[in-house]
Image (tube, grey):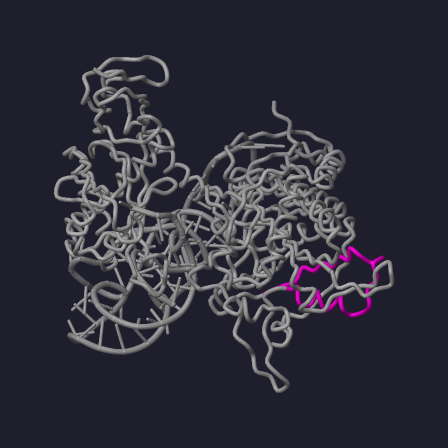
Amino acid sequence: MIKVEINDEDVHEYVSGITAGEVLDNIYGNRSGAVAAIVNGIQKDMSFTLDENCKIEAILGESDEGLYILRHSCAHLLAQVVLEMFPDAKPTIGPPIEHGFYYDFHMDPIGDTELKVLEKRMNKLIRENIKIVREEHENNVLRDMFADNKFKIEIIDEKIGNEISSTAYRQGDFVDLCRGPHVPSTSHLRWFKLTSTSQAYWRADRNREPLTRIYGMCYATKEGLKERQKQIEEASKRDHKKIGKELELYMIDELIGKGLPVWLPNGQILKSEIENYALKTEESYGYQRVTTPALAKQELFECSGHLPHYADGMYPPMEMDDGTYYLKAMNCPMHHLVYRNKKRSYRELPFRIAEYGTCYRNEMSGALAGLLRVRMLSMNDAHIYCTLDQVGQEVANNIKMVQDYYSTFGFENYHFRLSLWDPENTEKYIEQPENWASTQNHLRQILDELQVPYVEAIGEAAFYGPKIDIQFTTALGREESMSTIQLDFAAKERFELSYKDENGDENGEVFVIHRAPLSTHERFVAFLTEHWAGNFPTWLSPVQVQVITISEKQKEYASEVASMLKEAGIRVSVDDSDATIGKKIRMHRKMRPAYMLILGEDEATERTVSIRIDRKGESRSGDQSNGVPLTKFITDISIEINTKSRKLSLVSKE
RNA sequence: GCCUCAGUAGCUCAGCUUGGUAGAGCAUCUGAUUUGUAAUCAGAUGGCCGGGAGUUCAAAUCUCCUCUGGGGCUCCA
């Protein structure tokens, strides 16, 4: 007999040789939702044999560990049916990922039709409830088992080495090299869905074999799967590409080119509001503004280091009669020249120059997506020239600026990331290891002192220095970079930046901070649109007030109201057509005005307005405040706009 | 760039499997209607079916090429 302690609580006695699964069944019953066990702190299969005193816990399918196991097992099931259908396919790796799993196969690409068939066959095997069995083998046996799959052999050779034995998992005719643990049988994998296919490369290396990747999602319960499907559906309603079209924010025309958005009047309003706000804010933080050209000579970008390090990201060169020119991918080299334009004194530092400069980047055509990834970007850019001592304060100010901006725009779902270089992969970066070490520590210290929570990410630095990035989570749950604060210790030498210090010496220790708290206009508007689902706060709404008349008798009053609003600087549009009131409301919901003003006979005689909030995508409340004096409305909405209120507060709920 | 799916009226989409040269709703315009809060009626305009080539007596429909858009190409048994 052995003693088994369950969940650090009860101790039960069992015959030696009992399995983990049998013990858990005994305690919880066989419908507990457990997919594996933790024995003495180590994850084990349900089939693991207990032959001495131990501690045991269940891993529930809904826990993080459980979902990981479920998804991993589901990837195996996918591989099983892929091999049934395509016997020549070679499975490579199939890890669990967030929400699901993928599996990469060396095989010809497949389409949606095959994907559906694969899904059907997986469901069939799930109903058959095939046992998943762990096998331990000596290395040479494993090599024999996978002799016809060079990818698995490569894994065996590299990951496991030639000395030790390892494990495989078998289900029916299918066997896969795997560390486990796995669910005991296929019936646990009921709540999955194959989602898409894609092309990947073996070891993510373009020069190695192309693989066909199949993605799926997998959950422990029907509810889990449904909830994810719902999240995807909800996110698609917020898609900035869809809303951007409805609201006429931007267009992309193939005659202009991919990734080159045109801002339409409504989008331009958003852009201008953001920009005006940023100009004011940054003026108060001591920035001066400049404008620099869209292109410059090759020598400038050689000097900055962009050509050796960033050439792929730039448009190809233009040969002119007086030299070779490049479109700028960044504003910094030009700003460095602004700094260098005259002798600087220590009294001028920190010297801050800002520009909403338009840059052009040669993004891969397949990477372009609406406004989120474009080839023309207007950055909320600025560069700060300061001493090392001043870096801390400047970075702190920028973190505060970012936080202020975000709270005004209503963003909450973000986190800070300290982006470091990758010491294993140094050719991507400027070669100054001591500088990397010291500046990275410097930034880490600043973040620690500010007590801002952050994560560290190796290999995410810029080529010229470490960064603090502010990461966003989108409605779909994907992480994207939004703002950035970058430290540059390379510019001072490349551009011979210096200043006259307190002792009258020419001092070359000029540190540069690149920062873009509002990202680019394009990306920022995309996030903003998604975040508000197009229902922007009043100060940002392209149409702040939509006037709607009940009948044509109110035409005159409507135009009077409109001109008073315009006078007060409010964006207003009038519908005095002869359509019915219901129809007019329905039509204008799509453009999501902050407020609708309904004007009928009562309003016209009493010089009042009826204020209605009715925007597409919001649940319809029909909330309306009737008989509000026109002058009061103008005062109230002006306050709401000027305070950049995040809430529409002019309609009181009854 | 690579893999995959898609492209039909301003918008949303049907027609394509089984080839016989184009349809609906909304929007727009014109009448009628003068309206009090999610569809008033009638009529009209609107498409080189993304572009090119091929097969065929005949192509939106089948084949090939190309352009544009969506998704994916970071997760290492």
State yes or no: residue A349 in magenta: yes
Q: Is residue A6 left or right of residue A602?
A: left
Q: Is residue A26 visible?
A: yes
Residue A102, horizontal then vertical, whole percent: 31, 47
Q: What residue appears at the point 46 percent right and 59 percent down from the top-left corner?
A: A368
In the figure, A315 relative to A455: above or below?
below
Q: What residue appears at the point 52 percent right and 36 percent down from the top-left corner?
A: A618
Residue A290, horizontal then vertical, whole percent: 74, 63
In the figure, A190 relative to A508: above or below?
above
In the figure, A310 relative to A408: above or below?
below
Which is more toward the observer, A432 or A187? A432
Which is more toward the observer, A32 or A234? A32
Q: Is residue A80 left or right of residue A57?
A: left
How many marks overall?
A: 0
Which part of the image, by quadrant, shows the N terminus of chain A?
A: top left
Residue A9, horizontal then vertical, whole percent: 36, 14
Which is more toward the observer, A557 or A230? A230
Q: What residue appears at the point 47 percent right and 50 percent down from the top-left corner?
A: A242
State yes or no: residue A596 in magenta: no
Q: Which residues are magenta?
A: A331-359
Quadrant in the rendering for residue A534: top right
In the figure, A620 relative to A426: above or below?
above
Quadrant in the rendering for residue A137: top left
Quadrant in the rendering for residue A598: top right
Which is more toward the observer, A344 or A246? A344
Q: Is residue A553 visible?
A: no
- Residue that lies at the very extreme toward the bottom in this rendered image: A321
Residue A127, horizontal then vertical, whole percent: 16, 33
Q: Is residue B7 left or right of residue A133?
A: right
Which part of the image, by quadrant, shows the C terminus of chain A?
A: top right
